[in-house]
Amino acid sequence: MTKKELLEYFEFNSEEEKEEAEFYIAVKGIVLHTKILKYLDFNFHNGQKISWESVSGQLRQDKLLRDKLYIYLATLEEYIRAYIANKYEDDVGHSFWINGIGKRNRIRNNIEAGLNLFDILEEVDFGTLIQQVKKLPEEDIIRLFGDKGTDQNIEAVRELRNAVSHHKFMFSHKFLKCDINGVINDTLESNIKNLRQLLPEKYRFGTNGSGGITGDMRKCKIFI
């Protein structure tokens, strides 16, 4: 589909709206906009049009969701790094350290070179950090996540992080399955619940029980 063909499906209230559509198609791509139209159950073959306002509203909601999730994913990343560094800063002589792909991710090599563990972990990307967590002793995983830190749940949050970081359209992205209190699902809502259950408790519901990631998701019209 070309940009001209895509624009034919939109109904504009003003020339400014059309210019906005052209801008976002150039920035975010034709394919992303077709994904949004499919998510909105738009029929490409019945000759009807959809208001640009509906599409731009979905774009804003998607951005708001990604922005909010990024905060909590960064918090989880920070929490994991802090836990590992706090426990093993002066006790690095273990066999569970890994080397990820690329110089910055070679945790074991950098430890053997005498670099500071916290500084090493600050440079490691999230995917390598997740792989390192899975190599930690079981007692550490329990201390970090309770009984929720299964390989399945840890891999699911890694994919959620990838989707946010790579600006995927969150509402139709295919996520990994995760376990929420015995219910296994791959929906967006389940994956956000999985992130919540892996976060430190304060960030799940806030200090008053209605904040944290739960409250921020309500602002995104996602009720978990």
Image (cartoon, rainbow, N blue to C red):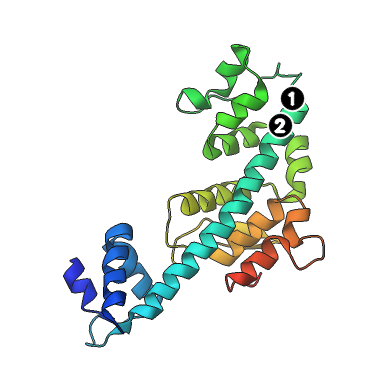
Q: Quadrant of residue 9?
A: bottom left
For residue 149, the mark is none
Q: Quadrant of the N terminus?
A: bottom left
Residue pointed to by mark 2 = 84
| Vertical arrangement, residue 73 with respect to residue 39, above or below | above
| Vertical arrangement, residue 35 with respect to residue 179, above or below | below
Q: In which quarter of the image is the C terminus?
A: bottom right
Residue at the extreme right of the image, as rendered = 208
Q: Is residue 77 visible?
A: yes
Residue at x-position 47% and y-position 53%:
163
Instruction: Determine whether, in the image, residue 215 is placed left or right of residue 55.
Output: right
Q: What residue type is labelled 2?
A: Ile
* Callouts 2 and 1 close, C-beta under 8 Å: yes
Residue situated in front as seen by the camera: 216 or 108:
216
Q: In which quarter of the image is residue 92?
A: top right
Residue situated in front as seen by the camera: 4 or 180:
4
Q: What residue type is labelled 1?
A: Tyr
